[in-house]
Image: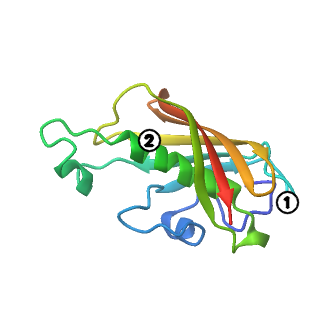
Amino acid sequence: MTNIDFPKELPMQVLDICEILPHRYPFLLIDRVMDLQGGSQENRVGRKIHARKNVSMNENIFTGHFPNHPIFPGVLTTEAMAQASAICAYMPQKQTERFYIAAIHDAKFRQPVIPGDQLDLYSECIKDRGSIVVFHSRAEVDKKVVAEAELWAKIF
């Protein structure tokens, strides 16, 4: 379990994730939270998450991206990293906070993600400035980095 008094057992299942994130099908891109640790009740710096997205051929996106060579879009990989970061930033005592992407810096996409891949999402809070929280995030498939970015979130 975590050292931040998180309200859920780990690994966290999709219904527990829905209690934290406002996203729903087809835009909920986190299937499970494997690990969450670090940070404190007052500051998120050092908090880390490992979440997972199972990429399935049944997802609607593959009917058009691309029909004969299906690739999970980089923008959705980035969104999955952002959703993992939002869970990482969640503070139970501040349940009304909403996180919105404010900036994406140094995004790199190293290899395509395809149906059947298990996307492991890692994010670490590197700055917590009250209304702005900054994360270093990466996505891996089979322990190989497929994408990474620095994500800035604005808290409302």
Label 2 neighbour load within 10 Å: few <14, some 14-19, many 20+? many
Please, what secondary structure does the residue beneath circle 2 have?
Answer: strand
Across the whole image, how many numbered discs are drawn on residues?
2
Which of the two discs, 2 and 1, sits closer to the camera?
1
User: What percent of the width, then of the height, locates residue 7?
Assistant: 71, 68
Q: Residue at the location (46% across, 56% down)?
A: 31
Taking depth in this image into account, of 12 and 78 the one nearest to the observer is 78
Q: What type is the residue that disc 2 sits on?
A: Leu
Task: Measure the alpha-carbon separation of dots 2 and 1.
Answer: 29 Å
Spot the residue most to the right: 42
User: What percent of the width, then of the height, locates residue 143?
Assistant: 49, 28
Name the N-terminal-most of marks 2 and 1.
Answer: 1
Q: Residue at the location (48% across, 55% down)?
A: 30
Asked whether, in this view, residue 104 is left or right of residue 78, the answer is right
Q: Label 1: which residue?
A: 41
Query: In the image, is residue 83 above or below residue 106?
Result: below
Query: In the image, is residue 53 above or below residue 150?
Result: below
Q: What type is the residue that disc 1 sits on?
A: Gln
Spot the residue most to the left: 68
Please, what secondary structure does the residue beneath circle 1 have?
Answer: loop
Q: Label 2: which residue?
A: 119
| Residue 148 disc label | none
Query: In the image, is residue 144 above or below residue 99?
Result: above
Q: Quadrant of the N terminus?
A: bottom right
User: What percent of the width, then of the height, locates residue 44?
Assistant: 79, 51
Asked whether, in this view, residue 41 is left or right of residue 142, the answer is right
Q: Residue at the location (18% across, 48% down)?
A: 64
